[in-house]
Amino acid sequence: MENTKQVAAEKLMSMLETCNPSETQKLEVYDEIFKPQFEMFKDSNRAKIKGLEERDFYILGETLAKQQMMQLQEGNSLANLGTLPTISLDVITAVFGNSVIPYFASEQVIDEVQGMVYFENVYATSSRGNIEVDDVLSRATGVPDKYPQGFAGEMVYGEELGTTTATNEFEVKVDYAPIRPQYVTVKLNDLIATDDGKGNLIGNGIFGTVNYTTGDITVKLAANAEADQKIIADYATNFEMGELPSINNKLDNKLIKANVYALQTDTSIINAYVMQKRFNMDMKLRAVNLLQENILNEVTNDILAKIISAVELNNVPLTQFNMTLPQGVSQQAHYNSVNYTFEVISNKMATASGKGKLSCIIASPKV
């Protein structure tokens, strides 16, 4: 039975190398070959905390497939490699499922120890609101050029149409026509006029007309205005009749060199027998746990070292919590400040990594 599985696995892996299948077809094959590993992945900490998507299984399958192909090429047959494939594939799965890396970065599988990693950036191909053409709205490796306001939403608030002269009639025009009827409000100091959906502006002491297609607006007053007063408009662009704001994406790439982590663990038949009899523990499973825990510990330490280095590079001051009680502060109040200290640290880490920082809080009476 075991030999049959090995032959099937080799045939399936060979098919993957020669047929150039789609991601969906590959995932179906991976699900058959690596079913035990996928089940282990479903029970991982990552699944419990973050949740899993189809893409997660595909990336894991790609990683395991490359490892298994390497083993087949090295040893010609899974049978010749003994328990090595089972242990190595299980260790990869355990580390992949419990790794801290997904909380800091996305994952991409590369074919070689040195390869290209791609980043997607989203940029604007039209101007609207506070966004200009070529502004980056989403950047994988840092903060965007601008945070959009009035770009994708139809409403435009507080647009300055012009200033008054000492007369009672003014010709102005909005920036983003065509206009949706019944959505126009024109303001001049305390005077406010709204459109009736038929091209007329109606108000007390202020009136006029609106051309919904071109965006031209005529404002008339009951009396002459003071000079240099701002004419302000709120309105909605009619997206059904005009051009939509547009975006596109670009792929940036970077050549990286993968870090290789390698450990081995040895045991004896006697040790395996004792562990089984005394603790009912499978030494193969224990070997997987030992290897993944120690590899993951070192990977995590390397990531933390990079974060600390980024903090120091950006001259972010340290945040410390002193266990000694300050004068006049109760022990409970002092220890309750630990949560605040962690918030400060998180904010500094995000700032140092270029992810921005908390700038405002929007609250309601119930929040």
Image: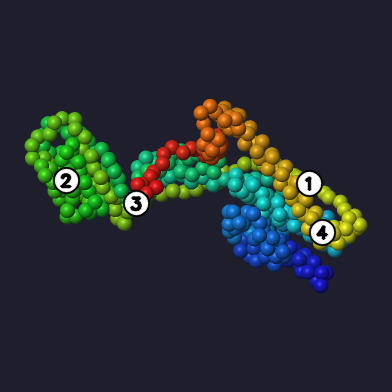
The residue singled out by tag 4 in the image is 279
The residue singled out by tag 3 in the image is 243
Q: How far is the residue under mark 4 from the one under mark 1?
A: 28 Å
Q: How far is the residue under mark 3 from the one under mark 2?
A: 27 Å
Q: Nearer the viewer, mark 1 or mark 3?
A: 1
Question: In screen coordinates, is 139 left or right of 132?
Answer: right
Callout 4 crowding tier (Cα within 10 Å): few <14, some 14–19, many ≥20: few
Q: Amino acid at mark 3?
A: Glu
In the rendered view, would you say 315 is above or below 99?
A: above
Quadrant position of the N terminus in the picture: bottom right
The residue singled out by tag 1 in the image is 262
The answer to whether the residue labelled 4 contacts the one labelled 1, judged by CB atoms less than 8 Å apart, is: no
Q: Nearer the viewer, mark 4 or mark 1?
A: 4
Callout 2 crowding tier (Cα within 10 Å): few <14, some 14–19, many ≥20: many
Tell me which label, 1 or 3, sits earlier in the chain: 3
Callout 3 crowding tier (Cα within 10 Å): few <14, some 14–19, many ≥20: few
Q: How far is the residue under mark 2 from the one under mark 1?
A: 73 Å
Q: How far is the residue under mark 4 from the one under mark 3?
A: 71 Å
* Residue 58 seen anywhere in this rendered image of the structure: no
Question: In screen coordinates, is 163 left or right of 13?
Answer: left
Q: How far is the residue under mark 1 from the one under mark 3?
A: 56 Å
Q: Nearer the viewer, mark 4 or mark 3?
A: 4
- Residue drawn at (29%, 50%), measured in percent from left and top? 237
* Rendered image: mark on residue 193: 2
Check the image and name the residue furthest to the right.
Answer: 270
Tell me which label, 4 or 1, sits earlier in the chain: 1
Q: Position of residue 135 (x, y in %)?
A: 44, 40
In the rendered view, would you say 349 is above or below 67?
A: above
